[in-house]
Image (spheres, grey):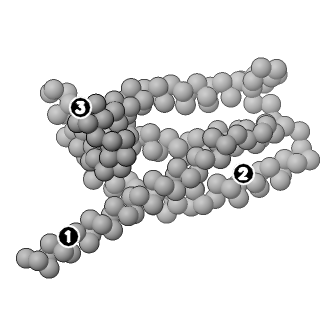
Amino acid sequence: SSSSSSSSSSFEWERDAKGFYDRHFIVLFVAALMYYPVILGIKYLMRNRKAFDLGGARSRAMVNWIFWWEASLAAFSFVAATQVVPLALEPLYEQGLSWSESICKLRTHDDPRAFWMFLFNLSKVFEFGDTVLVVLRKKKLIMLQVMVVYELFIVIEEEAKEEQEEKEHEEEEILSS
């Protein structure tokens, strides 16, 4: 318990995660907005070029970039899942909440594992690199790779809505006092 209290005092959602989103909103928004133009632009530039050999089953590349990229993402995802999945499931089993209440309404930001939620959200930006590697190898994109950009938009939009609701609530409190 002492480690969880020291973890929670070192990471504060409002200061660290929300602060990061606020400070880097434009960068994240532009990254999400540029997803399709960049991917389609690379596909267009690659149309008359040979696919990059970045690794894989029949690769002749000195470094298997695909393996190391995917292994890094998988390792991170595994570690993050050990923290985030229990955080999402505990309200279902311990409090009897519905799935939507657990994910959308329950405030878990004060839980020390919220740090991993923050990192998981940020990892979606790095998954953009995954899509770039697929396009450079002239492989077909799957729906999962295309959906990553929508996840990023949802995170940005929800953070903006939440901030607006907090400001409105603060204004109502000021006016009522």
Q: Residue at x 66, y 24 (%)?
A: 67
Tag 3 residue: 94
Q: Residue furthest left?
A: 177
Q: Decide if residue 87 is on the left or right side of residue 8.
A: right
SS of the residue at dot 2? helix
Q: Amino acid at mark 1?
A: Glu
Q: Amino acid at mark 2?
A: Ile
Q: Residue at x 61, y 47 (%)?
A: 147
Query: Marks 3 and 1, Cα distance to the nearest angstrom?
Result: 32 Å
Q: In the picture, residue 177 is in which quadrant?
A: bottom left
SS of the residue at dot 1? helix
**Earlier-in-chain disc, 2 versus 1:** 2
Tag 1 residue: 170
Q: x and y percent of residue 103 in the render?
A: 36, 44
Q: x and y percent of residue 160 in the render?
A: 39, 63
Which numbered disc, 3 or 1, marks the residue closer to the eye? 3
**Earlier-in-chain disc, 3 versus 1:** 3
